[in-house]
Structures are given as structure tokens and as C-alpha cells.
Amino acid sequence: MAYLVTTWAISIFLLVFQIPWELIGTLHSINDHFQVTQSIISRRFNESDFLLQRSKLKPQSNSYISPLFPKYIEPVKIENKHAIDTEIDYSKFEMSTHVPIVHLKEDLHPTNNPHWKLQNATILVLCRNWELEEILGSMRSLEDRFNKDYHYPWTFLNDEPFTVEFIQWTSMMASGSVSYELIPSEDWDTPDHIDEEKYDQCVQEFIQKEIIYGHSKSYRNMCHFNSGYFFRQELTNRYDYYMRVEPGVEYFCDFQMDPFRLMKERQKKYGFIVGLHEYPETIPTLWDNVKAFFDENPNYLHPNSAIDFLIKNEQIGFNPEYITDGIEYNMCHFWSNFEIGDLNFFRSKEYIEYFEYLSNKGGFHYERWGDAPVHSIAAAMLLDKDEVHHFEDIGYYHVPFYTFPSATTMKLGKKCVVEKRGKSFAEKAGEHTIEDLNISASGCLSRWWKYGSGKRFLREYWHSEDFF
């Protein structure tokens, strides 16, 4: 009976581990069977280990690795700077939904790699509590495509106290530490020099003209804050660089590099993805005030500036001549819903004076000046054109525009999800049309390539330790 059981067990092992039956003749004992089986199992585990190590050396493939669950996961650090008025039991936040990169060999982890040094940078979000669902989608997309490999901290700002629910969900989504801050009213509210009666009248005129966001005083406060105060907050004062993230955006491609490191090593001060024309009716007097400022401060205009990017309006390639009804400014600007910047540029004497001058003119409120053209004009005129970088290799979507890397090989290598943007996508976005700015007449990229820093390629920013 024992012999039959043993024979049955051996047969099962042979079938499961696919041991050739021809080997039976060479096996003279149960011990031989055991040794062969153990050797095959060991070899297979070694193969799995090798494949896992190899894949972990290739950051862009991390999304496709089966999850590993270590015995201990360092808790996400949460900091609250008067952002809520309710006490939270922080002990419940024991882990992040993003498991840190786990290597079977500790020396492969980025924190143990001497060449993999994080910059003094943060991912910055200005967000309301009711935008929780949208910001979670943005966070998940950026974590999957970039931050799961780096764990940069997230900083959340709000002009109202964050709710417990908001902090719970966003802190669990982040792979790095998370901080929350309530914006002081003096940095957010309408400035004292604004005439309230005139302000109300201007808002009514914008409503009658059906100008986008013309009805919203809160939107004007946001643009004013993003133009002159986001870099002066207690939490942002800690950092040298920031990446701005907004609710409802999507990142289509693996980053495969650290954009903060690129900014520092290449001495870039401002980075963008999307360049397009501003709505002229929102900034009718902005350019006149910009010119007046630089007339008073001619030495602030950088000798190698990109001012031609702002004032040239001839046809370039598929971009037609842009008619501005006598306004010298061609309305080209960098979309600020995605921007990576050097916070010390915004803290500079030149930028502070530039912002204060514009703020005192009242155009943020009497008109509807956006922070995007204010940032863009400053970057184009105060900086060397080579200090401004176009992140062409980052696929990005913010309603109603999207953009992808132009090179097919780059889209393949960076695992871009190139969706067909049809009617269903437009309906989802609440817009009639969704445009690819790489081929759209609304874009300003060809103008930037001609008058800005030109067209750059990913290979110029290659770091061997970032790739397999």
C-alpha cells in the first residue's frame, strides 16, 4: 500500500513539473526523484527572480508588474497647516494605495541609488473639496505615469478648510508625503484697491458679452492668487520647484525621467506642454500694461528673451496668420494648468515687481486676466529663451485639448495610450470638439519652435539610470 501511495505521489510530481519520463530509468531512489524536482523548482524561481530584477530596472514597465506586498510599508506622512477645522485620527492612514517600488535586492531601490537623487520639489494642487473625484483621477494618472517611481510630496492648497473626506482620499492616493494648507484670506480675497461698484459693473458687462468665466469673482481671485501668491505660501516656501496639477487632467505617457532633475541640471526656469492663443476679450488691456511696465524697467527685458514669440503673428506652417485687431500681442501663451517651474524665478525681484504692477492696474478683476498669459509673458520676457522648456514627450489632456509626442517611436517607447478622440470623448468633456494641439491652428508650438528655444529631443536629457 505504501508503495502504491509513493508511486502515485511521484507520478503527480512528474506531471506537475513536466519531468521527462525518460529520466525514470536514471533515477534509482525516492531521493533521486526529490533532488531532480527540487532542482527544477529552484531553477524556475531563479528565472522568476531574474525577470523581476530585470523589469525593475526598467521604470516604464512597472505598471505591468504583478503587485508585491512587503511585510512593512512606510506610512504616508500627512501634514495639516490649518487646512481643516476637525481633528483627524491620523493613525488610520497606515499605507498608500501605491505600494512603493519593491526590489528583491535593496541596493536597486531608488533611495539607495547614489545617482537617483530627488530634487527639492513638490506636486502642487489648488483644489476645492467638491473637486475630489476629479483630482483623484488626476493623482492616479500622474502616480501611475511618474510619481510611483519617485514619491515626490504633494501639496494641497484651498481657500476653504479641507474636509476630512478630502484628506482621507487624497492622502491614500499619494505615494509621497501629503500636506494641506488653508490660504490666508489676504492672499485670496479681492484686494482693497479694487472699487467694488466698478467691479460689479465690469462683471455684469462680461456676463452680457458671454465671456468665458466672466461671471465668476472666485475665478478672478484664483487667477490673481496663481499669478502672485501661490509661491509665497508657508508650504510652498519650502521648495525650489513645483509641478502644477489640476482636477480632471490625464497623462497619456510614461515620463521615464524626472522632470525636476531636468529643470535643475539644464538650468530651466519654466516648463510647459501646451501653447495656444488666449481669449482676446479676457485681456483687452493686459499687453498695454505689460509694455508700460517694461518701458519703466527696460533693463528687465532679457537680452535673449523670447519676445518675438509674443508679438510675431505671420503664418508658420499649419498655423495661419493670427489677426489681433491692432493689438501687438498675438495672444500666444503657455497653458498653466500644466507647468513645472522654478519657484525662485517667481520669488525674484523682477517678477514680484511685474506682478505688483499688474495687480495695481486692476485688470485681474475689472477684466479677467488669467494667470497663464501673466506667467507666459513673464517667462518670455524676463528669462533667457533657453531657460524655458517644452515638455513635448509628456502626453497630456485638459478639456478641451490634448497633446502627444509627435514621434511614433517615442509614443511606442513611452507606452502612450493614444486614444481616438471622437464624439463620445467630446460628450464626456462637455465640449463640441476636442482638438489635438500638435495639428491644431489653435496651437502656438510652431511659433515657439521658431522664436523660442527651438525644438528639443528626449535624447538630450538621457540618464542611463532612468532607463533599462
Image (tube, rainbow, N blue to C red):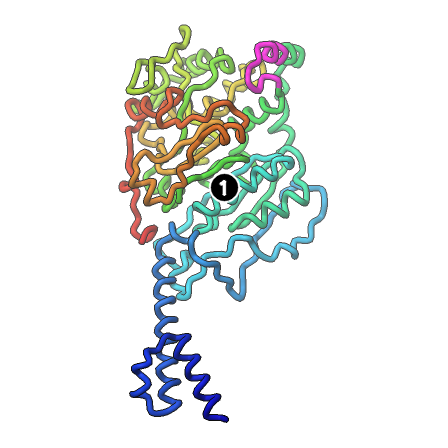
Q: Is residue 349 visible?
A: no
Q: Is residue 234 above or below residue 325?
A: below
| Residue 400: percent from left, percent from top | 48, 27
Residue lying furthest top: 326
| Quarter residue 459 falls in | top left
**300 or 248, which lies in front?**
248
Q: Which residues are magenta?
A: 202-215
Number of marks in the rendered image: 1
Q: Is residue 350 above or below residue 51?
A: above
- Judge from the rendering whether residue 157 lies leftward or rightward of residue 321; answer left or right: right
| Quarter residue 261 falls in | top left
Mark 1: amino acid: Ile
- Judge from the rendering whether residue 137 lies leftward or rightward of residue 335; answer left or right: right
| Residue 74: percent from left, percent from top | 54, 59
Q: Within the magenta stretch, is there residue 233?
A: no
| Residue 216: percent from left, percent from top | 62, 20
Q: Residue at x 37, y 45 (%)?
A: 415
Q: Residue at x 50, y 93 (%)?
A: 1
**265 or 86, which lies in front?**
86
Q: Residue at x 30, y 24 (%)?
A: 304
> Where the C terminus falls, by quadrant?
bottom left
Q: Where is mark 1, residue-wise?
A: 123
Residue lying furthest right: 86
Secondary structure, mark 1, is strand
Q: Is residue 267 visible?
A: yes
